[in-house]
Amino acid sequence: MSKKLIRIKVVMDRTGLARSTIYKYISQGGFPKPTKLGTRAVAWLESEIEDWIQDTVDRRDEEVT
């Protein structure tokens, strides 16, 4: 598993989600929580974001069949 941290802009690019949507999904428990880097900086584990994307695709594929 990758231990690389990625910032919000990369998360937005990878998922196609807006910042507000990401934080809404976090508050609803449907998106990985960020890791605090400092008082005003957070980042996500790249592997958790990739897993979330794969889970989203898997759910889509299950709905089709």
Image (cartoon, helix red, strand yellow):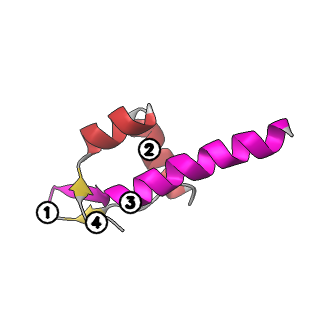
Residue at x 57%, y 55% (from the top left corner): 30
Query: Does the magenta stretch mainly form a helix, a strand or a loop?
Result: helix
Instruction: Kindly check if marks 3 and 1 are in contact, taking CB atoms under 8 A apart as contact.
Output: no
Amino acid type of the residue tagged 1 in the rendering = Thr
Q: Residue 13's x, y, as percent?
A: 34, 33
Q: Which residue is mark 2?
A: 22
- Labelled disc at residue 35: 4
Seen in the picture, residue 8 relative to 49 is either above or below; the reply is: above
Q: What's drawn in magenta, residue-wise? A: 39-64
Q: Residue 54's x, y, as percent?
A: 55, 49
Seen in the picture, residue 10 relative to 37 is either above or below; the reply is: above
Q: CA distance from mark 3 to mark 1?
A: 23 Å
Q: Secondary structure at mark 1?
A: loop
Instruction: Kindly check if marks 2 and 1 are in contact, taking CB atoms under 8 A apart as contact.
Output: no
Question: Which is more N-terminal, label 3 or label 2?
Answer: 2
Where, quadrant-wise, is the C terminus in this rendering? top right
Disc 3 packing (10 Å; few <14; some 14–19; many ≥20)? some
Q: Which residue is mark 1?
A: 39
Disc 2 packing (10 Å; few <14; some 14–19; many ≥20)? many
- Labelled disc at residue 47: 3
Question: Which is more N-terminal, label 4 or label 3?
Answer: 4
Of circles 2 and 3, the one toward us is 3
Quadrant of res 1: bottom left
Question: Which is more N-terminal, label 1 or label 2?
Answer: 2
Amino acid type of the residue tagged 4 in the rendering = Thr
